[in-house]
Image (cartoon, grey):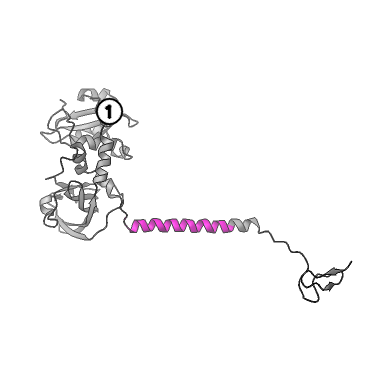
Amino acid sequence: MEHNCPHCGAPLPADASFCPHCAQSIRTRKAAAVPSHLWRKGLKWVLLLVILAAAAAAGWVLLHDSPTGLPAGETTAVVFQEDEDGMVTVTPEYLEEFFPTLTCIDFGTTSKSSRNIDDYLVDSYQMALLVSSRGAQSAVGERGMYSAGNDSNNRVALLIFDSNTHLMGYFIGSPTSLGDGKWQMDVVNCDYDFTELYEEELAAFEGNWEDDFSTYISPEEIPSSGAVWFLKGFDTSQGPVLRKDDAQIYSLWHTLHSPELERQCREIERLEEFLPKEGRWRCYLLLDQDYNLLGYTMLDHQGNGG
């Protein structure tokens, strides 16, 4: 039977594998299957590229502050002098020389390493006053101090406000030693309105805090209460009755429901180490060995209750 070339139509010799006229192959070719190990190798490279791209994106976020990160801005170098006891005191009067429009400050040591300014704001005395007073009070006149030479955790947080819910500057980190008892903080100038954050905290606090402060445990009952841990509030009370507008209520409530609860707790045996100064009362939340709330107590500077 005569065969013709499928390409040029010329007659083909028997058993021909190509056309002698057009030189085209007349055999049917099948696609070669790619070995499975080559597919896996290619997939690994794709996954590696995806991971590298994600890491690069994360690095960009860390280097370029986002609205929920640490606000960017120019810095102002502020130098503090420690006293003869190695204490550095931070006052609004001194900071007014650098930030004339400030209304109040919040300063203290911190164990946080967060890059989100909101985490420091919700822990601040300013936020505690705002929430507990429903926006009527702020930390006007407040100051802070830390032990520059002896404090093993000299990481500090300085927040500077020019209105109740507006942050104009901050420093978070370890001050730089300049020698001769001088310490420098490079304060970041910023423009951060945290009204929305305050409103979120107030909404979460309202109607939820009262259950946490419904059970009073007298000092005499503490040894038999099953308390193993405690959280301490501020020494802002001037009597044994916990007022509804006391700033330490929000501070304790916030810590109780935060992921850092266990790290913030102290052993009940150390309770007397954290009594308030004379003339003040402090609130303490008492927890069992599993960090479950048992109740609260109020103590004066001698460890007596009301």
**Residue 38 higher or lower than 20, as above or below:** above
Residue 242 on image: x %, y %: 17, 29
Residue 296 on image: x %, y %: 24, 28
| Residue 283 visible to an observer of this rendering | yes
Badge 1 crowding class, 10 Å Cα cut-off, few under 14, some 14 to 19, many 20 or more, is few
**Residue 186 higher or lower than 144, as above or below:** below
Q: Which residue is mark 1?
A: 211
- Main SS, magenta residues: helix
Q: Which residues are magenta?
A: 41-65
Q: Quadrant of residue 126?
A: top left
Q: How many marks?
A: 1
Q: Nearer the viewer, residue 31 or 40?
A: 31
| Residue 181 visible to an observer of this rendering | no
Magenta highlight on residue 1:
no
| Residue drawn at x 27%, y 44% as measured from the top left | 197
Please name the amino acid that badge 1 sits on: Asp
